[in-house]
Image (spheres, coloured by chain):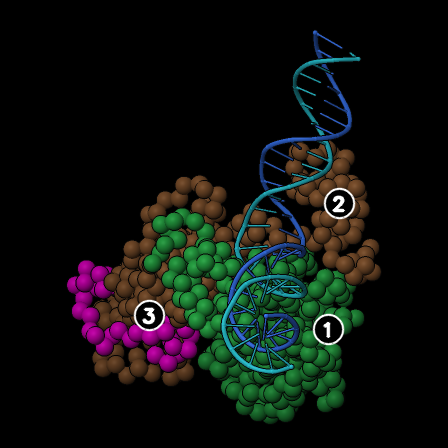
Chain colours: A brown, B green, C cyan, D blue
Amino acid sequence: MAEEAILGQKIKLSTIADALGVSTATVSLALRDSPLVADETRERIKHHAREIGYIYNRRAASLRTSRSGILGVVVHDIMNPFFAEILRSIETELDRSGQTFLLSNHYDDLEKQRSFIDTLLQLGADGVIMSPAIGTPAEDIAMAERNGLPAVLIARAVEGAEVPVFRGDDAYGTALATNHLISLGHRRIAMVGGTDQTSTGRHRYQGYLDAMTAAGLEVKPSWRIPGPRTKQAGFDAAGRFLTIEDRPTAVCCWNDLVAIGLMNGIARAGLVPGVDVAVTGYDDIEEAAIATPALTTVWNGQREVGRRAASALLDKLNGRPVRLSQELIKPELHVRQSSGVPIKTP
Amino acid sequence: MAEEAILGQKIKLSTIADALGVSTATVSLALRDSPLVADETRERIKHHAREIGYIYNRRAASLRTSRSGILGVVVHDIMNPFFAEILRSIETELDRSGQTFLLSNHYDDLEKQRSFIDTLLQLGADGVIMSPAIGTPAEDIAMAERNGLPAVLIARAVEGAEVPVFRGDDAYGTALATNHLISLGHRRIAMVGGTDQTSTGRHRYQGYLDAMTAAGLEVKPSWRIPGPRTKQAGFDAAGRFLTIEDRPTAVCCWNDLVAIGLMNGIARAGLVPGVDVAVTGYDDIEEAAIATPALTTVWNGQREVGRRAASALLDKLNGRPVRLSQELIKPELHVRQSSGVPIKTP
DNA sequence: TAACTTTTTTAAACCGTTTAAAAGCGATAG
DNA sequence: CTATCGCTTTTAAACGGTTTAAAAAAGTTA
């Protein structure tokens, strides 16, 4: 055992070949379970390889095969639980395929995203799953694909990019939440968090607008408080929200992080979220259920997004046909305490 | 532009060499700014390379140089904000070194950790930063090093492993928190979360015990509620905590996630954390400051751990001497509302 | 035993880069 | 006119695997 340490020599195919008196071709074939080598030879080779601690050199192999076994995953921020859950399901899906994946945050910085894609190209990655940064041009994706890096998008679409996209039906989702608040008797409803610069942002806002309009309710510009999608941002927005003239009685938040931050901010100001102000989130992250009060939110099918994206990418790699159509996953409303009980209409 | 698409041929060094009537060696040297090539030649080459969209093939290069530019980072769970913050500082530190890093969770599963290390070896990674899974034998690390994969540990130590370790002084940290609670007048203090199976777990518990003992206070077995280090676990522990006979008035939690979960659980039961029960956390994650109530916690120097680990690894790669001694980072107490105001001693 | 199959193994080309050593070349010195 | 030198470029051999046509060995049939 541990001969590598004694010899101090790198162990390669030829080390095994020499020791057993066969050729490197035979060893290569045997280790990959090729039917071309006799059972007995294969066993001898595999056994010896294990014995001396042989380590397969993927770089050398991939140079010849042009398959690196590396997949890239780029998201906005892995610390965002929404992406974290997607990542987990991608991980689960890819684990059994034997691919390793390279992870990167782009923090919505286009240059960082580009440099990561460049790295993937240099490493000969087999494919990439990405939640594109704000402002990603279709050409960036086309370029990757031209250079042998097939892509699949999640969460956000890119205008003009001819690749599969997996995301939730955002407009439908915020409409669900807004209608729920309306049905509880709320007439003045704010929307906190998010930005118009992403397709997701526009869709979520649109769903809210549509629901309000359909119910014949007015929407004041001051009721829209855009911002980052973090707890901190939600917390910070509380101050501004509480001072709105003729303050709304309910808030439809961009996501759960913003909602939880906002509830914390509201509580800090001495009001009780879920009683004094109704709040809804979006994504249904794990924490939503244990927040205080438990958060009413829109389940967004993160698991599903990750799973489908991963399997679509694997299909693409293996030359199986993949539909280009945007796969819209239907969200569901999960009602908890934060949206409160019905209030009487004025 | 985009000639690669028209030709349909892979662009390599020789493509450029042929086009310009020079050898591949010259092209290789020129692209790497070697002083060996004439300025004019270099410019011609670089310009042409950009023109036709040449992509450097790192696999081929690293086959020759045996430097892959890949570093591995293995942690328990990247979605845990404690690790997430460490990752961010590692990322910052490594970004300027031009190394890309491969990330993986092991979820304390030794086999998963092994398979990731194996992948790193196969890819010829230059080094690895790891927070070892429970039960990691020193031999696993020694094996990696023997095969040219230098390692640096974070957060947890491995008995007998001769590699640098960067972690906070956990015993000192929980002692800080416990002493704080004692100084506020608490006499019955519980400890929630964590396990004895990791060095960190033992140290944190020991710090709590030491502080209690030093103050001449009794510690009942029922006051120790071990468990996972998640919000959900903290939330779940609330039920058990609230039914302890002669219930403690304060809780020293394993980390901030557990503390926040516990506070949510306590609030759900109608009690007010920070008033009815004093709670402290550990790590001082970003969320601690905006939790309700704001969490008193122990700052653990995550930034520092990540930064030092990354730079130690780079030192190791470049053959600079690295001290083996465990670097203990001194934690600091950050007092906020969750530990409440002094209570009168009975 | 020869001829033909089938199974097993091998040799050599190849993947795209790096690098030590060799070579070309104009200028300067002897 | 030749020798030496510096600068620039080229040659050719790695790096460690995979692939495939072809050779060798073993097994069948006539």
Badge 2 or badge 3: first in the primary sequence: 2
Check disc 1 and report its element: helix, strand or loop.
loop
What amino acid type should be assigned to the residue bearing mark 1?
Val
Numbered circle sitting on residue A194: 3
Q: From this view, report whether residue A151 is shown above or below residue B282.
A: above
The spot of residue A46 in percent (x, y) is 74, 44
Q: Are marks 2 and 3 in contact (CB under 8 Å)?
A: no
Q: Is residue A292 rendered to the left or right of residue B151?
A: left
Q: Which numbered tag is attached to residue B163?
A: 1
Callout 1 crowding tier (Cα within 10 Å): few <14, some 14–19, many ≥20: many
- Residue A17, which numbered label? 2
Which image quarter: residue B84?
A: bottom right
- Who's the residue at 50% across and 63% down the image? B27
Q: Range of the magenta residues?
A: A208-237
Q: CA distance from mark 3 to mark 1?
A: 45 Å
Occupied quadrant, residue A170: bottom left
